[in-house]
Image (cartoon, rainbow, N blue to C red):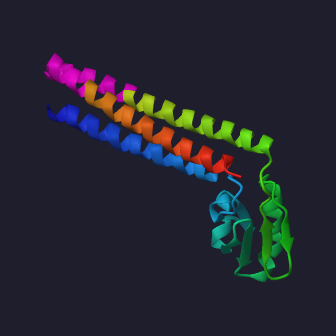
Amino acid sequence: MNDAIKKQLDDAKSHMERAIDFCDGELTKIRAGKAMPSMLDGIMIDYYGTPTPLNQVGTVNTPDARTLVIQPWEKTMLSAIEKAIMESNLGLNPQNDGTIIRLNVPPLTEERRKDLVKKVKEEAEKGRIAIRNIRKDANEKIKKSKVDGTSDDEIKLGEADVQKLTDTSIVKIDKLAETKEKDIMTV
C-alpha cells in the first residue's frame, strides 16, 4: 500500500477516534438520574465579569448518589453559582446554606427516562453521521491518489480498510449509546 493511502487511513482513524470521544462526551452530559459532577460541566459562572466554568470557582462533590455539593472558593460567589444553576435548565434546585450549595438530583420519571433515551439515540446518530462523513472524505482523497499513480487495486484495498475503520467506529458508538441507555433505564 502506498504512502498516500496510508496517510489517509491514519487521518481517517484519528478523526474517527475524535468523533467517538466527542460523542462519548455528549452522552456523558445526559443526566442518568445519578448525581455526577460532570452534569455541571457546561455551567458558566459570572466571575467578576468573566464567564468561568463552575469547576474553576469551587469544588463539586457527590456525597451520595442523589446529591451534589458545590463549595465555592469565595463565599461571595454563592449567589452567582446559584443563579447560573437555575438558568442552566438542568431541572435542579440549588439550596444555599451560606457556605455551600446542595443540589438534590430527583429520580427520573418513566416519561423523562424515555425522553433521555431519545436524546441518547440522537447523539449516537450524530456520531454515526460524523463517522460516515469522515469515511466519505477519506474515500474521495484515496480516489484522488489515482492521479499520483496509485493502482486501482490499491485504491480498492484502501477503501476496504476505511470501511473496516468505519464499521468498528460505529460499533463503538453503538456500545456507548447502549451503555448509556441501560444506565438511564435502570431505576
Residue 172 appears left or right of 120: left
Could you say which is closer to the camera, residue 123 or residue 41? 123
Which quadrant of the figure has residue 80? bottom right
Which of the pair 165/77 is nearer the observer? 165
Q: Is residue 16 left or right of residue 186?
A: left
Examine the structure image and report whether residue 138 is included in the region drawn in magenta.
yes
Residue found at x 27% / y 34% = 8
Q: Is residue 104 left or right of residue 122?
A: right
Question: Is residue 31 shown left or right of residue 28?
Answer: right
Comparing 155 with 187, the one in front is 187
Residue 131, by quadrant, is: top left
Highlighted magenta segment, given as a residue range? 136-158
Q: Name which residue lies at 27% across and 36% down.
A: 9
Q: Taking 68 as reference, is 165 above or below it?
A: above
Residue at left offset 31%, top offset 31%: 164
Report the magenta stretch's main SS. helix
Q: Residue furthest front?
A: 187
Residues 83 and 16: in front is 16
The answer to whether one can see residue 74 in this image is yes
Relative vertical location of residue 34 with respect to residue 150 in this rendering, above or below: below
Q: Quadrant of residue 10?
A: top left
Q: Residue at x 68, y 46 (%)?
A: 185
Tally of numbered discs? 0
Q: Position of residue 154 (x, y in %)?
A: 16, 23
